[in-house]
Amino acid sequence: MPQDVEVFPIIDVSGSAADYGPAASNDVGTARIGGERFERRVVEVHHRSAQREIRRSGEQGAGHRDLFSADLVRQPAGEDEEARTRRDQVVEMTYQNLTLWRAARDTQRNWALARRPPPLIDIEHVALRGTLDPRLVLLSEPGSDRARSYRLLRHRLFSNGDPRTVAVTSAHRGEGKTTCALNLALAIAEDTMTRTLLLEANLPRPALAQVFAFAPSRSIVEKIIRFSSVGPPYPVVSISGTRLHASALPDTPLEGRRLDRTLFAAVLSELREAYDYIVVDAASVLESGDVDVVGESSDAVIVAARAGRSGKRELRRAIAQLAPAPVLGSVLIDA
């Protein structure tokens, strides 16, 4: 045998590992193709050429694939047509087996990456006392037609791509976007084992603290605005009597401040690991440019409109300004 030639065994088609290094010339095995058992032939390979192919490919599996496709396998002398067919079948099955193995490896790797631990959530409990705010429709009148309308909106979202991050806005202030956002979040939180977060991002006119009648000590969005930082633990409040978590801004408007696009997107990406659904109460479209940042980071956008107050022209203008954010439609409040 020439000095630059060594014997490489064909990889075992049973599915487990493969011998990629040199082997003895009398190495034989068995494989099964179409129910027939036969000897696994040991083929002679130009060793130096094979090593170059493997180094060029960067992976052993791909190296063997290139090895076969580059026609570096030397056909044994005196091989008949039947033996050649069997050898080609073994080579083909070997390549298919390597492909399946690499796909399984990549799937396992992606699964491990997807199971990274969720970020830390700092939860403060808030009890609802006294008379409830009339905007809390699902808590103050859970059996009313208005409450059923918000549950219907929830089901419409589930059947329309099931977006996990939904931003709620309006053309102008006072058109019901906060009412829509908090009742949609309450409706989603009614489902058992559903983790829902109501995130306030309306910097000019925050309202959630007034609705739930508490003074928030910290806020996720305020942390981004004031400290230009992002990272856990994320402060939220747990609303008593519900499975809803909320992050409300202080009552004092943050005038002249703007949401950082990169930081806000990074925060939402981490919060998706901790919550199944996130509802964002955003600013009005024609009042603040922050809604564009929120819309681009969300899976869907809903535009609220109030009966007898919202105009069709302003509504069309607001929807056009939100592009290319995915606007699902508009919701009519107090129809």
Image (spheres, grey):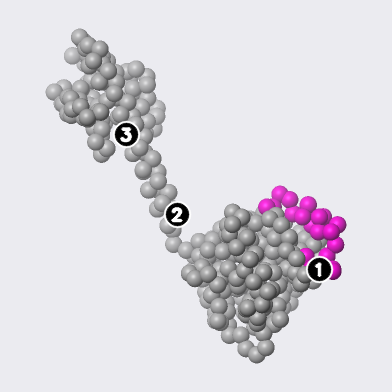
For marks 3 and 2, give the CA distance.
26 Å
Quarter of the rendering containing residue 148 = bottom right
Q: Is residue 56 above or below residue 107?
A: above
Q: Nearer the viewer, mark 3 or mark 1?
A: 1
Question: Is 78 or 56 nearer to us in this picture?
Answer: 78
Quadrant in which the N terminus appears: top left
Q: Is residue 30 above or below residue 134?
A: above
Q: Would you name the residue on which mark 1 appears?
A: 307
Amino acid type of the residue tagged 3 in the rendering: Asn
Disc on the earlier residue, 3 or 2: 3
Quarter of the rendering containing residue 8 = top left
Q: Could you say whether the residue bearing mark 3 is in a helix, strand or loop?
A: helix
Q: Residue furthest top?
A: 78
Q: Nearer the viewer, mark 3 or mark 2?
A: 3
Alpha-carbon neighbours of circle 2 within 10 Å: few (<14), some, or many (≥20)? few
Q: Residue furthest bottom?
A: 130
Percent x, y of residue 20? 26, 31
Q: Is residue 73 above or below residue 23?
A: above
Q: Is residue 326 above or below residue 183?
A: above
Percent x, y of residue 209? 67, 79
Amino acid type of the residue tagged 2 in the rendering: Ala
Q: Could you say whether the residue bearing mark 2 is in a helix, strand or loop?
A: helix
For marks 3 and 1, give the CA distance.
63 Å
Q: Which mark is residue 97?
A: 3
Q: Which mark is residue 114?
A: 2
- Could you tell me which residue is drawn at 24 percent across and 36 percent down? 14
Magenta span covers which residues? 305-326
Amino acid type of the residue tagged 1 in the rendering: Ala
